[in-house]
Amino acid sequence: MKINVHAGHNPDGKIACGAVGLIKESTEARKVKKEVIRLLRKKGHKVYDCTCTNGTSQTDVLKRIVTKCNKHKVDLDISIHFNCGVGDKKGNGKTTGTEVYVYSEKSAAKPAAERVVEEIAALGFKNRGVKIRTDLYVLRRTNSPAMLIECCFVDDKDDVKLYDAKKMAAAIVDGINSQKK
Ligand SMILES: [Zn+2]
């Protein structure tokens, strides 16, 4: 397959660098992205890194990412993010978990998105499932089938404790590669 992969947001320390909780979204998404690309290439896929490092605003970051994505006609666009908003800084013994977004029920990326969320959940994260999001720029504007992965929550101690960049990346790649009968 041909696959575009990018980490969401600008790098840490720059404008529009994403969510910050117990860990930083931008940094972790880049670690996962790097390993996802390495593993996909090892499996023989042609992979393009569409990560943006120099956007001037949140809108500009998104535009730059989508411009890079749309330079290649691919089988899948993979956007790697981390979620936030739960504020469980002490840990309640339960993860808030993982979810994956696609643009529509009919998206060609939906079957792969379902496998990805199942593989991440198999690491122990609560499975929040595949959700339809028509409001996200990256899903709306990319030409190829796209999924946006919210690996886990940066502001949930239980998620952060369980999270490991290499295992997260391996789960994503297993999801992309696995063929359901
Ligand atoms: Zn994000």
Image: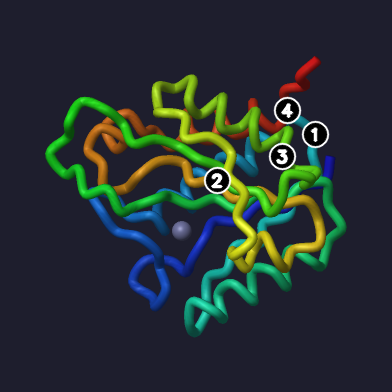
Assign the C terminus to one quadrant of the image.
Answer: top right
Q: Is residue 28 above or below residue 17?
A: above
Q: Alpha-carbon distance for marks 3 and 4?
A: 14 Å
Q: In this picture, is 129 found above or below 33? A: above
Sequence order check: which comes first, mark 1 or mark 2?
1
In-image side of 127 versus 38 (left or right) = left
Front of the two marks 2 and 3: 3
In this view, the residue farthest toward the top is 181
Do callouts 2 and 3 mark residues in contact (Cβ within 8 Å)? no
Q: State the residue in front, 134 or 60.
A: 134
Name which residue lies at 55% across and 74% down.
61
- The residue pinned by badge 2 equals 149
What residue occupies the far bottom of the structure in this picture?
A: 56
Which amino acid, by three-letter code, is at mark 2?
A: Ile
Specify the amino acid type for callout 4. Answer: Asn
Q: Nearer the viewer, mark 3 or mark 1?
A: 3
Q: Position of residue 125 (x, y in %)?
A: 40, 28
C-alpha span from label 1 to label 2 = 22 Å
- The answer to the question of whether label 4 and label 1 lie on touching residues, with beta carbons closer than 8 A, is no
Give the left or right position of residue 67, taking residue 13 as reference.
right
Which amino acid is tagged 1? Gly
> Which residue is drawn at the image coordinates 64% and 75% (left, top)?
64
Look at mark 3 in the image and give the residue it sits on.
110
Say which label, 2 or 3, has the lower sequence index: 3
Disc number placed over residue 177 in the picture, else none: 4
Q: Residues within 10 Å of mark 3 (few under 14, many from 20)?
A: many
Q: Residue at x 80, y 43 (%)?
A: 108
Q: Which mark is residue 44?
A: 1
Q: Reading the chain from its start, which is encountered first: label 4 or label 2? A: 2
Q: In the rendered view of the protein, which quadrant contains the N terminus?
A: top right
Spot the residue most to the left.
Answer: 90
